[in-house]
């Protein structure tokens, strides 16, 4: 039997009212929801509003499907969500925080939108998670791809340079969701793109994620100050609650007395991925196993860091697509990225992109099951 890979445009996600921010009325008609399905029945839904992954349906060890991505079934909920959780979105132009919303390139200081205390977070007030992207289906071998493009203006949210961004989601028959990021600029600028899906491998809305077992391939992390800006130190995780080098339940050490856990309200930190010297390809960054269902998520990336955020700001006020409350720590994010505040941290790997260069990173989310 020939298996069909398919990409379907499910519906127009047009809306009637003007939302809070981030979208022009003329864009409403162009918001769509796309469905990618592979030969094994795995389904991924993506909207071109914010390049958001709205749903990921994967099997458990008995083949029972569940949607493991937190999110909504309509675009208005994404636009109006309180506390801006960034469910499922592509975050940019700079994912994570930049201290005081400032950086200097070639002696010139740039002031960015300040939207997180005194700092800049996730690209500003209208980041890439709140704009409408162009979407196009691509035919690829052994999979289905959706290519999303967006051009950010020179000066948008304070960043220099017109930035042309391409994000390609590819669903393959081995239950992998590959995300390829590319960008070019007209002026030197800082770029750090990431994917902000919240996962709950029991299924979205099914309680908290504290009993999921997490392994992070990282023997160091970047400690932060009270505003979650890195101090510049790369600290050893050994002997601290931050040691996930051997798999352990997410919640095992989360309540230990540790200043870093106080600052984050739990885990909300960047880990430094262990990478063999000279290797610039995909390396395993994280593995998460949910014991009850047997669902496993493995993340490979070309990036140097991964922000592990365990949904500390969720508090049950947001209700998801199936009507269930997203409780405190009801989802975890593993955001592959460069380290936070890299533009102001000379010892961190650089996020500077110059005209003529191409920003290019890849992250793969691989879904499996365990006995
Ligand atoms: C990131 C940040 C968190 C929080 C979430 C969104 O993971 O590090 O502090 O802002 O995004 O709620």
Image (spheres, helix red, strand yellow):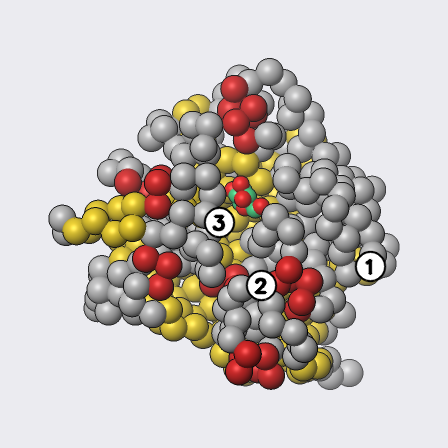
Report which quarter residue 250 is drawn in. Answer: top right
Q: Which residue corresponds to mark 1?
A: 322
From the top left corner, tell me how far across and down residue 276 is, in percent: 38, 41
Check if mark 1's residue and mark 2's residue have beta carbons within 8 Å: no
In terms of image quarters, where does ligand 1 lie?
top right
The residue pinned by badge 3 equals 336
Is 291 in front, or is 189?
A: 189
Counting from the top left corner in percent of width and height, residue 371 is at: 79, 45
Residue 140 seen = no
C-alpha distance separating marks 3 and 2 = 29 Å
| x then y, percent, for residue 161 | 27, 65
- Badge 2 element: loop
Query: Element under label 3?
Result: strand
Give the SS element for disc 1.
Answer: loop
- Residue 69 is tagged as none
Asked where in the image residue 211 lies, by quadrant, the reply is top right
Residue of label 2 = 20
- Separation of disc 3 and disc 1 at Cα? 28 Å
């Amino acid at each position: 039997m020939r298996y069909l890979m398919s990409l379907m445009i499910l519906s127009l996600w047009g809306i009637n009212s003007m939302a809070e921010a981030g979208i022009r009325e003329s864009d409403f008609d162009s918001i769509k929801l796309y469905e990618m399905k592979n030969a094994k029945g795995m389904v991924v839904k993506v909207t071109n509003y914010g390049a958001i992954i709205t749903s990921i349906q994967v099997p458990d060890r008995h083949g029972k499907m569940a949607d493991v991505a937190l999110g909504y079934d309509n675009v208005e909920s994404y636009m109006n969500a309180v506390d801006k959780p960034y469910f499922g979105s592509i975050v940019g132009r700079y994912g994570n925080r930049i201290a005081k919303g400032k950086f200097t390139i070639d002696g010139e200081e740039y002031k960015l939108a300040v939207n997180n205390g005194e700092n800049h977070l996730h690209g500003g007030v209208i980041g890439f998670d709140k704009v409408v992207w162009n979407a196009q289906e691509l035919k690829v071998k052994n999979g289905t791809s959706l290519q999303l493009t967006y051009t950010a203006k020179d000066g948008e949210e304070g960043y220099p340079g017109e930035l042309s961004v391409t994000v390609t989601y590819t669903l393959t028959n081995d239950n992998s969701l590959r995300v390829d990021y590319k960008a070019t600029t007209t002026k030197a600028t800082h770029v750090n793109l990431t994917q902000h899906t919240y996962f709950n491998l029991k299924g979205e809305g099914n309680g908290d994620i504290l009993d999921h077992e997490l392994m992070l391939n990282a023997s160091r992390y970047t400690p932060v100050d009270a505003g979650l800006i890195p101090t510049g130190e790369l600290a050893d995780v050994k002997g601290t609650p931050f040691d996930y080098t051997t798999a352990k339940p997410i919640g095992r050490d989360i309540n230990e007395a540790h200043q870093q856990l106080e600052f984050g309200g739990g885990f909300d930190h960047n880990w430094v991925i262990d990478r063999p010297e000279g290797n610039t390809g995909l390396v395993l960054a994280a593995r998460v196993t949910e014991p009850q269902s047997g669902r496993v998520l493995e993340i490979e990336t070309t990036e140097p860091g991964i922000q592990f955020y365990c949904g500390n700001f969720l508090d049950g006020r947001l209700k998801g697509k199936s009507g269930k409350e997203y409780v405190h720590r009801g989802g975890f994010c593993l955001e592959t990225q460069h380290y936070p505040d890299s533009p102001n941290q000379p010892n961190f790997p650089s996020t500077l992109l110059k005209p003529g260069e191409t920003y290019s990173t890849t992250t793969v989310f691989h879904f499996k099951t365990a006995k």
